[in-house]
Image (cartoon, rainbow, N blue to C red):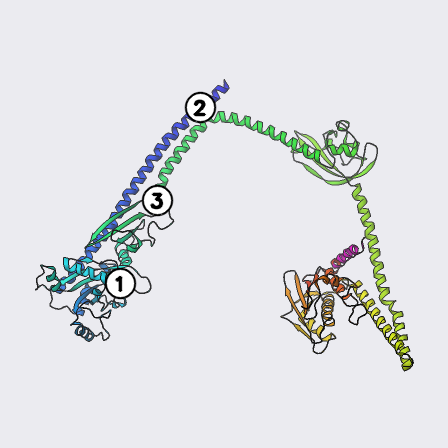
């Protein structure tokens, strides 16, 4: 019965929704059609308004031209000053905005040209000449043009009859005796900026004493023209002003709607050439004006149908849909609530089961023992790791007290005394406890504990991690560290003994050899003298080796303080102190930086690099160049020479202690410790050193010195760790 009522309520709800949606759709369609019809009527009215405004304004311009013809008809001669006053009184820009001017064009024959030009010059225009130059049978010259501003002065004296488009319009005006519009031209008034397309309107002036019945008679009787030049953009702005805010339109000269015939475009973009969506409305008219056909194309601008109008039909649809949905929700609410409750219960049950499976999967796969404890302190769950670690089976653990696993209780109070919580886990800090296996074996474990409550009953979870192996390894590490520290101290003591105590016998042997050579003089055989000198050389080499050994043992351990070091000044001081041939050059390239660092270690590294470059150079006139670059972490010092170079195979070897490229018994052989000292020193402070070289190409040693060096305690700790690594097996 309940199921049938639910089905019936649902069916009625859907039926009412369907009917109401149909009614809403019809209401939306009717309102949308009404808005479209209103917009169509408004668009047609706007286009007709613009079309009529253009036609009316051109008719008004015709009346102005006829008034000029009337002036000439009523007077035997109209002077330039009289024409100017006539135009000024007409107030063209006030009553006829958009017109460029009104002028008089006179016909001048070839025979009259020279006399005509002289007469105009005598009127105060000494440079006047008919333009363009050339011999023609007849000239249609711009004689008067007002207002006579800078732009119209460019047309003064222009022979309009010399240009085909203008001549065609002038001939047509003579033939018809009526105003005639020319084809599209570029006015001579135009400059290089804001060039607009234009046209002219001609009205002929005839000698009324002569007959005008035939075309030949009209040509013989014509004296000139009253004409008006127009710049299309200025004309349309004067006619329309702000009347086209919601539509765009274009005027084409003729019936062809192409860019070549475009006379005026209100938005500067030819229709059909942009990526914008097609206009909502468009219309084309042909306008016949004074013997010329203009085609006017109109289209609506985006948003021609305003937001309020557009929103009307949308609002009708929204209100209808809202009412439809409310009816549907009210009628079907009972059935939906019933279905929703059932689905929610099923979803919660599945989610709970899924979480249980996920929790069990995580616990079962964990390597550490995990147990759950109820309010009485009894175990209610133990994962497989618990069975493996403690040796109990799950059946043996479940239902027994958790204290079975510990030598003493891991919490300060009994689980049963915990207050009921809100169901949120409350974690307790990790502690270390002694756990007991089934066979009585004890081990140390790290215990993590969490508490929560369900339906007012407290529960706890324990995670136990066997740390006995870790404790043994930590003890072994501490023992190893102690032994390594002792080993490092023994190495330091050995270096001190080797560099101090062993040098005393060497000095004694050196003195004995020196005294023997001095006392014996020439009595010793040359062979013995040579042997004694070689022995002195070897003693000196051994003494240097002991000094370098001591320096290597102290590298990176110098007790120095941070100071601001001017490395430019430091390098100059080192260059003046180094033993080098007089012709050997040491140069600084660019500016070396000043920064806060340990002066003594840096000085040791730079001195050794410069000394090596001089000592191992194969020429006495060589050059060493020192430069530096700085980034956010390091100062990169470069010590470059033009010496013999170092083969790529030896780039790693030269930084190892006691390794040298020269033969051990050669005079150029060093101790093989210098570069090792530099490497150990710079690395102890967090830097590094590298080399770029090849045979015959010189060598470039790059010292990457850190810009920031930690305090001495940090440096000593780093050095201690590196020493431990160096001597560890």
Disc 1 and disc 2: Cα gap in Å? 78 Å
Q: Please, what secondary structure does the residue beneath circle 3 have?
A: loop
Crowding at label 1, few (<14), some or many (≥20) Cα neighbours within 10 Å?
Answer: some
Instruction: Locate residue 120, reporting x and y percent.
Output: 19, 73
Pick whichever, 413 or 93, lies toward us: 93
Disc 3 and disc 2: Cα gap in Å? 41 Å
Instruction: Locate residue 213, reporting x and y percent.
Output: 9, 59
Q: Mark 3 near mark 2, Cβ–Cβ under 8 Å? A: no
Using residue 506 as the reference point, say whether residue 49 is left or right of it: left
Which mark is nearer the camera, 3 or 1?
Answer: 1
Q: Residue at x 46, y 24 (%)?
A: 10
Q: Residue at x 68, y 32 (%)?
A: 360
Q: Residue at x 80, y 71 (%)?
A: 666
Magenta stretch?
A: 715-729
Magenta highlight: main SS? helix
Crowding at label 3, few (<14), some or many (≥20) Cα neighbours within 10 Å?
Answer: few
Q: Residue at x 41, y 30 (%)?
A: 324
Crowding at label 2, few (<14), some or many (≥20) Cα neighbours within 10 Å?
Answer: some
Which mark is nearer the camera, 1 or 2?
Answer: 1
**Pointer 1: what residue?**
187
Mark earlier in primary sequence (1, 2): 2
Using residue 488 as the reference point, say whether residue 345 is left or right of it: left
Disc 3 and disc 1: Cα gap in Å? 40 Å
Does 380 lie within the magenta span?
Answer: no
Q: Which disc is residue 306 wearing?
A: 3
Mark earlier in primary sequence (3, 1): 1
Q: Quadrant of residue 685?
A: bottom right
**Pointer 2: what residue?**
11
């Amino acid at each position: 019965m309940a199921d049938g009522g639910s089905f019936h309520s649902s069916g009625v709800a859907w039926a009412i929704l369907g009917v109401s949606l149909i009614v809403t759709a019809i209401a939306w369609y009717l309102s949308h059609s009404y808005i479209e019809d209103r917009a169509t009527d408004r668009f047609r009215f706007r286009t007709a308004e613009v079309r009529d405004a253009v036609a009316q304004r051109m008719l008004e311009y015709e009346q102005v031209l006829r008034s000029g013809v009337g002036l000439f008809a009523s007077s035997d001669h109209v002077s330039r000053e009289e024409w100017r006053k006539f135009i000024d009184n007409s107030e063209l820009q006030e009553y006829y905005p958009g017109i460029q001017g009104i002028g008089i064009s006179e016909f001048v024959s070839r025979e009259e040209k020279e006399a005509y030009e002289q007469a105009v010059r005598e009127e105060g225009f000494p440079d006047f000449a008919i333009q363009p130059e050339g011999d023609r049978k007849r000239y249609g010259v711009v004689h008067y043009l007002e207002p006579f501003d800078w732009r119209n002065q460019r047309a003064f004296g222009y022979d309009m009859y010399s240009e085909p488009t203008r001549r065609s319009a002038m001939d047509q005006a003579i033939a018809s005796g009526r105003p005639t519009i020319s084809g599209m031209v570029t006015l001579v008034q135009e400059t290089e900026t804001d060039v607009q397309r234009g046209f002219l309107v001609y009205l002929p002036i005839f000698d009324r004493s002569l007959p005008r019945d035939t075309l030949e008679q009209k040509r013989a009787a014509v004296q000139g023209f009253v004409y008006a030049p127009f710049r299309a953009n200025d004309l349309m702005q004067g006619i329309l002003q702000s009347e086209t805010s919601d539509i765009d339109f274009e005027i084409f000269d003729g019936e062809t709607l192409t860019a070549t015939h475009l006379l005026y475009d209100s938005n500067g973009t030819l229709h059909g050439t942009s990526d914008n969506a097609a206009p909502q409305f468009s219309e084309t008219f042909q306008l016949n004006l004074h013997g010329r056909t203009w085609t006017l194309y109109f289209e609506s601008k985006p948003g021609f149908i305003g937001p309020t109008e557009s929103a009307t039909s949308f609002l009708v649809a929204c209100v209808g849909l809202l009412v439809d949905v409310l009816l549907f929700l009210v009628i079907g609410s009972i059935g939906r609530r019933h279905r929703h409750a059932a689905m929610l219960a099923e979803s919660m049950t599945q989610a709970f089961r899924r979480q249980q499976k996920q929790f069990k999967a995580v616990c079962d796969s964990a390597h550490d023992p995990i147990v759950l404890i109820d309010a009485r302190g009894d175990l209610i769950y133990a994962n497989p790791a618990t069975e493996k670690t403690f040796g109990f089976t799950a059946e043996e653990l479940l239902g027994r007290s958790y204290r079975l696993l510990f030598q003493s209780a891991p919490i300060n109070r009994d689980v049963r005394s915990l207050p009921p919580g809100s169901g949120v886990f409350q974690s307790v800090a990790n502690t270390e406890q002694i756990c007991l296996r089934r066979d009585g074996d004890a081990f140390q474990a790290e215990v993590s504990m969490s508490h929560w409550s369900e339906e007012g009953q407290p529960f706890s979870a324990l995670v136990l991690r066997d740390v006995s192996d870790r404790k043994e390894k930590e003890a072994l590490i501490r023992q190893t560290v102690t032994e390594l520290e002792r080993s490092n101290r023994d190495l330091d003591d050995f270096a001190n003994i080797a560099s101090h105590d062993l040098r005393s016998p060497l000095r004694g042997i050196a003195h004995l050899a020196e005294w023997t050579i001095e006392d014996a003089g020439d009595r010793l055989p040359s062979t013995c003298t040579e042997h004694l000198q070689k022995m002195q050389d070897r003693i000196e080499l051994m003494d240097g080796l002991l000094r370098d050994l001591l320096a290597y043992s102290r590298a990176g351990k110098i007790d120095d303080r941070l100071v601001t070091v001017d490395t430019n000044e430091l390098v100059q001081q080192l260059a003046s102190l180094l033993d080098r041939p007089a012709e050997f050059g040491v140069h600084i390239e660019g500016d070396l930086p000043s920064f806060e660092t340990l002066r003594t270690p840096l000085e040791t590294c730079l001195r050794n690099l410069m000394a090596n470059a001089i000592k191992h150079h194969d020429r006495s006139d060589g050059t060493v160049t020192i430069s530096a670059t700085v980034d956010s972490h390091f100062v990169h010092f470069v010590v470059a020479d033009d010496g013999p170079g170092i083969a790529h195979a030896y780039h790693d070897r030269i930084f190892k202690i006691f390794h040298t490229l020269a033969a051990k018994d050669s005079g150029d052989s060093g101790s093989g410790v210098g570069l090792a000292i530099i490497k150990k020193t710079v690395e102890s402070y967090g830097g590094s050193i590298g080399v770029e070289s090849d045979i015959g190409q010189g060598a470039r040693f790059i010292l990457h010195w850190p810009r920031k060096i930690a305090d001495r305690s940090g440096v000593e700790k780093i050095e201690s760790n590196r020493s431990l690594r160096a001597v560890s097996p």
